[in-house]
Image (cartoon, rainbow, N blue to C red):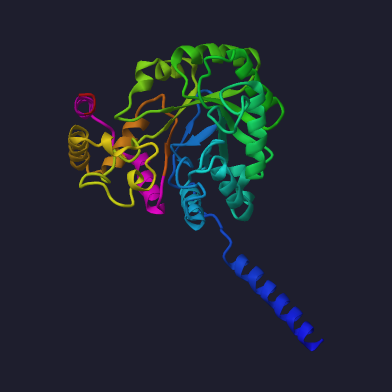
Amino acid sequence: MTSSILEVIIFVKNNNYIRIWEELNMYTASKERYTAMEYNRCGNSGLMLPKVSLGLWHNFGDTANFENMKKLCFTAFDNGITQFDLANNYGPEPGSAEKNFGRILKEDLGEYRDELIITTKAGYDMWEGPYGNWGSRKYLLASLDQSLKRMGLEYVDIFYHHRMDPNTPLEETMGALASAVQSGKAIYAGLSNYDGETLKKATAILDELHCPFVINQNRYSIFDRTVEKNGLKETTGELKKGLITFSPLAQGQLTDRYLHGIPEDSRIRTDGRFLKESILDEHRLDQIRKLNDLAAQRGEKLADMALGWLLQHKEVTSVLIGASKPQQILDNVKATSCAPFTEKELKLIDEISLN
């Protein structure tokens, strides 16, 4: 009996110790978090977004270190990054980024929910069978429910359709986005990977449905000018919608990461799903070196210049960065105070990157 009482006492003491330890180690956001970051209005809506947002496409799956995920999120929020961008299929495995971010919300960030913009998407392959992909009403609304469950949320701030669906009527897909908002499970609607022509049609439908569609998300960087060619950037400006750009550093190419070879801890080595070693041929490496030289002349790092180049476009509301280390976030935040570009510098960037 004495042994049992002793065990209970030890158990209670250990529990108390754990609770005290957790309280001592609970995250408290920096009181200076809104002093450095600048915020842009998202199109003509009332929504303000940080110039730099954190994407959870990489480094938040089950193969990544959870404590590092927390550090990345805390560093971002402490420096005014209020927007955290996810999708149903981010991982690996699909869904794991939302699950891990949900755990961070539950343990630490949840008390700041009203200061956060949390976004998710559906449109790519997520589960087996005919209902786990593309843009049907069944898929989009089911996926949103799953995303909310994984993150432990009642709503997301922006719910995106992740890609154009050539086989589902646009009216059905846009109707699903409108239903998501009307149900209270999303505050705003967004479109990702659309082109200018389809954006115009989608906007007309969403306007008719009185759905607050506010933003487009597309790949855009010094090396990838697709939005300039397919009408998306121009149409975004005409319709007064926001534009948030992903892969602004071209998966790390627009940094000093690959100036002297491929590091063993680089994305190419650790997760070669999207950035292949073959992309970094001698021509691309020469382009990177020349751009790096220009950045040095401006007194900046290449990454700062690449992000600043995007932010100087009036159509761009925010740039989505990815990070594997907290210091990368701190470095990228500096881009919000990037020096203005001269016409000569802009022309030189085009000459280097487009040839």
Whether the magenta-drawn stretch holds residue 290 is answered as no
Residue at the spot 34% in from the left edge and 30% down from the top edge: 221
The location of residue 23, given as percent across then percent down, is: 62, 66
Residue placed most toward the observer, 41 or 95: 95
Count the marks: how many? 0
Residue at the spot 61% in from the left edge and 47% down from the top edge: 102
- Split into 4 quadrants, where in the image is the N terminus? bottom right
> For the magenta stretch, what is the residue range?
323-352
The location of residue 80, given as percent across then percent down, is: 48, 46
Q: Magenta region's main secondary structure?
A: helix
- Split into 4 quadrants, where in the image is the C terminus? top left
The location of residue 297, given as percent across then percent down, is: 18, 40
Residue at the spot 57% in from the left edge and 36% down from the top edge: 88
Whether the magenta-drawn stretch holds residue 350 is answered as yes
Residue placed most toward the observer, 260 or 159: 260
Residue placed most toward the observer, 144 or 295: 144
User: Quick check: 349 above or below 34?
Assistant: above
- Residue reaching furthest to the bottom: 2
The location of residue 163, given as percent across then percent down, is: 50, 24
Residue at the spot 37% in from the left edge and 40% down from the top edge: 336
Residue placed most toward the observer, 96 or 245: 96
User: Quick check: 151 above or below 3?
Assistant: above
- Residue reaching furthest to the front: 129
Give the quarter of the image for residue 147: top right
